[in-house]
Amino acid sequence: MHIRLIAVGDRQPSWVDDAFDNYSARFPREWKFRLDTIATVRRSKNDKSRNAMEAEGEQILTRLNPAEQVILLDERGKQLTSTGLSSRLGDWQADGRDLCFVIGGPDGVSENCRVRANMTWSLSQLTLPHGLARILFAEQMYRAWSLQQGHPYHRE
């Protein structure tokens, strides 16, 4: 199973990149993890339209493989405990399809992206900065894997 993250926003502060890289470097090699970034579409100060979100959504959709399971990260999604995520990860691994997680742009994702997603996962009901969402995603995926392995990283 291959896992990747598509994230809108190609420029993050160095502390975000450092923390994300720290956790993603711990992922098992068989995941062949990859981060694909999409540049945030420029928004004008007074533009209240959905044009930017739709444009970003089209870019996301063109990068998705039809056979992949797509998990959208959004605060309106299903919340999971760390052990619940570990169990879900086991289900995804048993399914055998590759996984693609998606973090949308500043205004979220288009309806077409929502429809394409197999699941919507909420890291928190709080609205998170995109860089922090990347870090939390990587840490929780590492934690889920370490729970499966019986590694002492996770403590009850």
Image: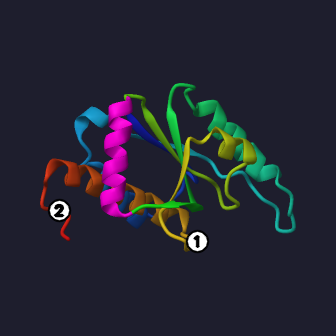
- Name the quadrant containing residue 61: top right
Give me the residue at 26% from left, 48% from top: 25
Vertical order, 79 against 52 (above or below): below
Residues shaded magenta:
81-95
Give me the residue at 74% from left, 55% from top: 42
Vertical order, 7 against 59 (above or below): below
Task: Give the residue pinned by disc 1.
Answer: 127
* Quarter of the figure with the N terminus: top left
Q: Is residue 146 visible?
A: yes
**Which amino acid type is shown beneath numbered disc 2?**
Tyr
Q: Is residue 129 left or right of residue 111?
A: left
Spatial CA span between label 2 and label 1: 27 Å
Secondary structure at badge 1 equals loop
Toward the viewer: 49 or 43? 49
Q: Give the mark nearer the N terminus: 2 vs 1.
A: 1
Task: Give the residue pinned by disc 2.
Answer: 153
- Give percent across and percent down for residue 92: 38, 38
- Name the quadrant containing residue 44: bottom right
Toward the viewer: 30 or 43? 30
**Which amino acid type is shown beneath numbered disc 1?**
Thr
Q: In this view, does 107 lie to the left or right of 129?
A: right
